[in-house]
Amino acid sequence: VDARGPLQEPGLDLGEGDIVLAVNGVDMDLSRDPYAPFVGTAGSTVVLTVADDESETGTRDVVVKTISGEGNLRYRDWIENRRAMVEEMSDGKVGYIYVPNTGRDGQSDLVRQYHGQSHLPALVIDERWNGGGQIPDRFIELLNRPVTNYWATRDSKDWRWPRGVHAGPKAMLINGLAGSGGDMFPWLFRHNDLGPLIGTRTWGGLVGISGNPSLIDGGYTAVPTFGFYEKDGTWGIEGHGVDPDIEVIDDPGLMLDGGDPQLETAVRVMLEALANGEGLQPTERPAGPDRSGMGIAEEDKSSAPDEPPLRQKTAARRLDRRAAFHFRRNRARFEATAQPPIAPAMRPSRISMSVTRPSSTSRRIASIRLTRISIASADAAGS
């Protein structure tokens, strides 16, 4: 909703260059600020009288619900301009996602932009000026999902699974005004080997505040409560930040005309990565399977030669655990009712036996197949 201005609502048919003649019946006065008629109307409905050459009176009235500020619209416009710039520079091969913070708004923006561009071969994640918030584990989990399989469909393009997974090269833009969660985001990006960090070193303020009680007069104290250290037992990030892999200074002189040297570098790096074949390569659909028999043909099984399929190994382990459990549970009864040992030449590899197991209402016979019973146990019983 915040991406659409009040003058873009369906049916208004308004555009740049249209002339507003009156607001709520009060004529516009060129000697006053043009916003004067809108004072006190934020969030309410107003009637605009606009010029219309096709109308008999030369004017028409439209009903518009106002907003209290243009910040959200300008923010969305800035993102869309960067996205369009990346699309043009990459010929549609690279997507652009801006993440303003690591809180609720940042997560919403990431998900909104990610799923609309996850099909593109490469992505640039822009976290410059990231205001932080929370530890962005779920952000990285979204960006780092692996492809597990494909689904062959009858009447459409095959599906890559999970839905929305991006398996191509990625890069992240960082700068000195990204901190706290904005420090942790690029650190996790690098830690998971998702791609290069491009720009300048981040702020370096990752010590967090949490659980501080409010004061009786309504005030607040911000006491640091947790800080970051590495698995090797050394402190990190705080007071220094996260260094880029490719340093690019955001020179204001190059940005006056709408340029963005850091973003331009990221697009160039992503195009080079695509040209070098980085990222998951497409998998061709195999020939249609022969369903005349049962199961999967040997040549279609993904297991390594001379090794049982993973599913069979897992089932065998589960059967072994179940058999061992029942054997321990009924061992005393088994030993009490065991038959004389079988001669070595006649010993089978599998021994079937029946044991009784009590229940709350009756006693019933459960047939339990015990596998891999040690020959040594049988020898011991015989002796």
Image (spheres, grey):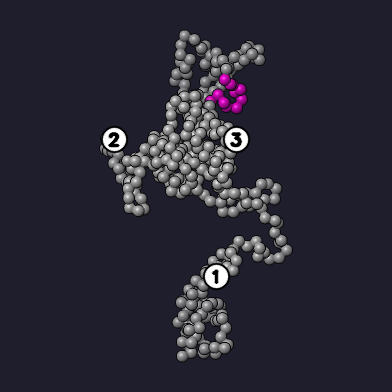
Could you tell me which residue is drawn at 53 percent across and 51 percent down? 146
Residue of label 3:
91
First reached walking from the N terminus: tag 3 or tag 2: 3
Residue of label 1:
316
Q: Quick one: SS at disc 3?
A: loop
Residue of label 2:
219
Residue 39 place in picture, x, y as percent:
45, 18
- Give the residues in magenta: 6-16
Residue 23 place in picture, x, y as percent:
52, 16
Give the CA separation, mark 1 to mark 3: 52 Å
Which mark lies nearer to you, 3 or 2? 3
Type of the residue with mark 1: Ala
Q: Is residue 220 above or below residue 324?
A: above
- Residue furthest left in the image: 216
> Crowding at label 1, few (<14), some or many (≥20) Cα neighbours within 10 Å?
few
Give the CA separation, mark 2 to mark 1: 63 Å
Which mark lies nearer to you, 2 or 1? 1
Magenta segment, prevailing SS (helix, strand or loop):
loop
Type of the residue with mark 3: Asp
> Crowding at label 2, few (<14), some or many (≥20) Cα neighbours within 10 Å?
few
- Asked whether 149 or 272 is in front, the reply is 272
